[in-house]
Image (tube, grey):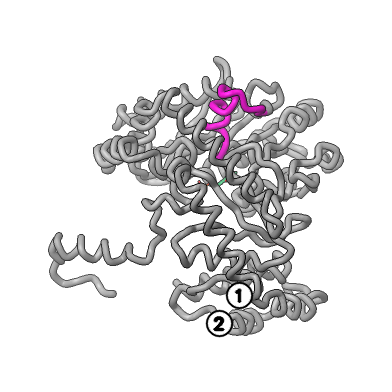
Amino acid sequence: MILPKQGVSKTEITKNLEEFREGDLDWRSGKVFGYVFDPGKEAMEVGKEAYMKFLTENALDFTSFPSLFKFEKEIVEMAVNHLNGGPEGVGNFTNGGTESIILAVKSARDYARVHKPEIKEPEMILPITAHAAFHKAAKYLNVKIVPTMVDSNFRADVAAVKNAITNNTILIVGSAPSYAHGVIDPIAEMAAVALENNLLFHTDGCVGGFMLPFYKKLGEPVPDFDFSIPGVTSISMDLHKYGYTPKGASLVLYKNRDIRKHQIFACSNWTGYTIINNAVLSSRSGGPMAAAYAVLNFLGEDGYLEIARKKIEATRKLVAGVEKHKDLKLMAKPDFCMFSFTSETISVFHLIDEMNSIGWYIQPALSYAHSRHNIHLSINYSNVEWVDALLEDLYKSIEKVRGVKHGEMGEALRKQFEDTDPDSLSDDDIKGLLQMAEIGGSTLPKGMADINEMLNALPAKMRERLLIEYTNGIF
Ligand SMILES: Cc1ncc(COP(=O)(O)O)c(C=O)c1O
């Protein structure tokens, strides 16, 4: 593409936009179990309208746009109350869970620089089920990750966390829940370990933080995970997931200002305007804040309770449907509206492709440690009425893929690379692997089963190199 010399008409642009979207996941169908959080038509409209009203306002400078300052203050205050933060609780609005996590890790790192200056190589203790955003934060901020094992139900092992503490530890992380299996870590015990050792503790409530209090109100057995636990010092909580507000909305919350102070960035070492940033980004649209404010107020507690009630019921039905099928195996009983299941008799990757080819979206996850490769479902409000249809098609699809040959390429690759140090492979070796799986070039792949089988057979570091090479080539 080159920039057109003369502008294109609005009609043509609208037509092009619609055409571009043709290959996208049809989330409006209610058959997409992931990525999109649809609160229903009316709430969606309320969010969109507020978003568009504040699309152009810039959160770069809260003194110039008191409206945005007010949105952020009110939303944070609501969130602190929601998570039992008490009068000392503070926080900020960010544009996503990853950003909230990066900021929480930065605050912990810089808090340690002041309070434990003897630490030169900071470490964060991370159960292997914690979200990849912590790995990103660690890379960006030069914090070492000390991974810890999880139990057979994929909950963090408290003894392993305790054993992982060193003189360099600055932060312990737990998830409520972790994305992959939808289970909540033993946050109270983990945070107690942090407190005993004078360490900060972060609860990643990106997916669950907002909804879990409603689950609790409905009588679900939700373990404590928030600021009601004395050792919890920060929480990430997304609004753009199960808060059902439009994307670009998350919160990072702190027990007090002493810790949060280390998140804020100010710069006067240049020739331009004064910079004070609460978040990673500087210029950013007021749209997500306004939309979050609007949807939260529009739905209110009753609206969210109703959504929670329906999702609890739908999750139960789906879990039961998986448990009763002889070819499927639930990975762990979930604490939330997300879970995963696997199979030892049929190819889960082909099952996913088959389901996705008939209009569903269900998500693959590769094996890692004792978590076998699996199918992940994030259950949403818009999915609720599709639960029976999903199970019906899932059972039919199992029969369709039952005879499909699988595992041979994976096995061959596993053998070929079991003694190979991923760092010893050249870029050309990596490109050769991509060609072998017939991926690369500049188009998106159609079926994913073979690609997933290949990735699944390789060690994590090699998977990462392949993905980077592929992505570097395709854009
Ligand atoms: C538990 C958890 N933490 C963090 C994130 C990252 O959130 P985002 O995609 O908004 O950056 C996710 C995303 O799914 C998540 O499930």
Tell me: is circle 1 under 8 Å from ligand 1. Answer: no
Amino acid at circle 1:
Asp
- Reading the image, the residue beneath label 2 is 438
Residue shown at the point (64%, 66%) measured from the top left: 464
Asked whether the beta carbons under mark 1 and mark 2 sit within 8 Å of each other, the answer is yes
Q: Is residue 157 left or right of residue 307?
A: right
Amino acid at circle 2:
Glu
Q: Nearer the viewer, residue 191 or 435?
A: 435
Q: Is residue 296 left or right of residue 451?
A: left
Residue shown at the point (61%, 23%) measured from the top left: 219
**Vertical arrangement, residue 230 with respect to residue 23, above or below:** above
Magenta-highlighted residues: 206-222
- Image mark for residue 37: none
- Reading the image, the residue beneath label 1 is 450
Q: Residue 63: percent from the left, percent from the top? A: 33, 29
Magenta-span inclusion, residue 165: no
Sequence-first tag of 1 and 2: 2
Magenta-span inclusion, residue 215: yes
Quadrant location, the N terminus: bottom left
Q: Is residue 8 left or right of residue 62?
A: left
**Vertical arrangement, residue 224 with respect to residue 471, above or below:** above
Residue shown at the point (65%, 20%) measured from the top left: 228
Residue 110 sits in quarter: top right
Q: Residue 284: percent from the left, percent from the top? A: 36, 44
Q: Residue 195: percent from the left, percent from the top? A: 76, 26
**Vertical arrangement, residue 381 with respect to residue 64, above or below:** below
**Vertical arrangement, residue 199 with respect to residue 446, above or below:** above
Identify the secondary structure beneath mark 1.
helix
- How crowded is the residue under tag 1: few (<14 C-alpha within 10 Å), some, or many (20+)? some
